[in-house]
């Protein structure tokens, strides 16, 4: 029996980390409309439990707080990508900074998404990494 696209996407889990509640809520809404299971957080503390959540993809803002002592998305992505337990999880850094491509490369991220983005861009990049 053939599964519908919606059935295939259901169960695909995406972790969204952005300290801007409006942006995070918009991303969550768009992804849930496409039948993805979404876990969202306003800070990076959720990454301490990433192995419990077992996401299929991580979307993460580069600047998670205004406090300089907190790690950036770039640093967190590098940690995830150099850890044997999490390096398989595709990581996409989201940011409005002009050098987002370099930030993503330095963070070993799989891709980046420049803010502001539209719904089609978001879904295209997600679908690229979630088959």
Image (tube, rainbow, N blue to C red):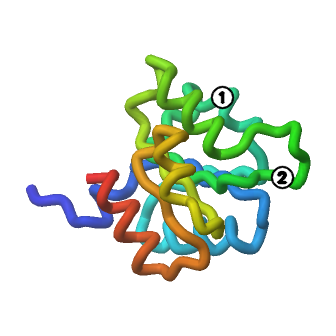
Q: Nearer the viewer, residue 25 or 122?
A: 122
If you read the primary sequence from the N terminus, does the residue marked by circle 2 or circle 1 appear first? 1
Residue at point 78%, 58% (across, down): 19
- Residue 70's quadrant in the figure? top right
Residue 56 seen in the current view: yes
Provide residue 63's location: percent of width, then percent of height. 74, 54
Label 2 secondary element = loop
Q: Is residue 29 left or right of residue 25?
A: left
Q: Which residue is mark 2?
A: 65
Q: Is residue 45 left or right of residue 108?
A: right
Up-down: is 15 above or below 80?
Answer: below
Image quadrant occupied by the N terminus: bottom left
Q: Nearer the viewer, residue 96 or 15?
A: 96
Label 1 secondary element = helix
Q: Nearer the viewer, residue 46 or 93?
A: 93
- Density class for disc 1 (Cα within 10 Å; few <14, some 14-19, many ≥20) is few
Provide residue 60's location: percent of width, then percent of height. 61, 52
Up-down: is 112 above or below 29?
Answer: above
Up-down: is 74 above or below 116?
Answer: above
Provide residue 84's location: percent of width, then percent of height. 44, 17
Q: Is residue 44 left or right of residue 120?
A: right
Looking at the rendered image, the disc whose residue lies closer to the viewer, 2 or 1, is: 2
Q: Nearer the viewer, residue 92 or 46?
A: 92
Between marks 2 and 1, how big is the CA–CA gap? Answer: 19 Å
Residue 14 seen in the current view: no
Q: Are marks 2 and 1 in contact (CB under 8 Å)?
A: no
Q: Which residue is mark 1?
A: 49
């Amino acid at each position: 029996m053939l599964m519908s696209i919606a059935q295939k996407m259901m169960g695909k889990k995406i972790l969204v980390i952005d300290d801007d509640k409006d942006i995070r809520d918009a991303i969550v809404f768009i992804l849930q409309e496409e039948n993805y299971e979404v876990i969202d957080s306003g800070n990076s503390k959720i990454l301490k439990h990433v192995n419990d959540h077992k996401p299929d993809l991580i979307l993460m803002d580069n600047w998670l707080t205004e406090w300089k002592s907190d790690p950036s998305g770039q640093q967190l992505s590098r940690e995830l990508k150099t850890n044997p337990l999490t390096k398989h999880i595709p990581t996409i850094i989201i940011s409005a900074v002009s050098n987002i491509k370099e930030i993503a490369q330095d963070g070993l991220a799989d891709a980046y998404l420049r803010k502001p983005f539209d719904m089609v861009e978001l879904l295209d990049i997600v679908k690229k990494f979630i088959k």
